[in-house]
Image: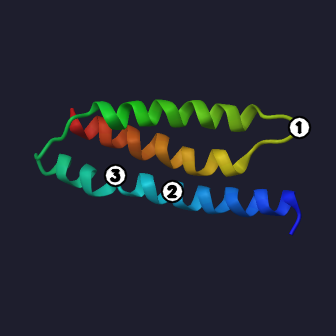
């Protein structure tokens, strides 16, 4: 296996797992909507961090880095929703 294929494999696995990290916010969003609010700061800062990674992946040259963009987009959306519902 070449270094490039290994890099793609490891990156793809990491992106897949990263999506599940942010899917884990869904039960908290549900609890927040039911009135059992949690602290909003961790998901806010996670969403900001993810947004920075999305921008980095989007502006990467010579081509966009979808392995960074896709899971971190989930983090922006779900982290942002978790923050908003915790207010």
User: Which disc is residue 80 wearing?
Assistant: none
Q: Residue 7 at x, y = what percent?
A: 77, 56
- Residue drawn at x 43%, y 36% is 46
Neighbours of disc 3 within 10 Å: few (<14), some (14-19), many (20+): some
First in sequence, mark 1 or 2: give its number. 2
- Residue drawn at x 50%, y 49% is 74
User: Which disc is residue 25 wearing?
Assistant: 3
Q: Is residue 33 left or right of residue 46?
A: left
Residue for badge 1: 62
Q: Is residue 63 left or right of residue 23?
A: right
On the rendered image, what quadrant is the C terminus found in? top left
User: Which disc is residue 19 wearing?
Assistant: 2
First in sequence, mark 3 or 1: give its number. 3
| Quarter of the image where one finds residue 55 | top right
Rendered image coloring scheme: rainbow
Q: Determine the residue located farthest toward the left in the rendered image.
A: 35
Label 1 residue SS: loop
């Amino acid at each position: 296996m070449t270094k490039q294929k290994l890099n793609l494999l490891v990156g793809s696995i990491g992106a897949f797992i990263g999506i599940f990290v942010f899917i884990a916010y869904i039960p908290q969003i549900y609890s927040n909507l039911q009135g059992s609010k949690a602290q909003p700061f961790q998901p806010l800062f996670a969403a900001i961090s993810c947004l920075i990674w999305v921008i980095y992946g989007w502006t990467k040259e010579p081509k966009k880095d979808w392995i960074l963009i896709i899971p971190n987009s989930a983090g922006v959306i779900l982290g942002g929703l978790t923050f908003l519902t915790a207010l």
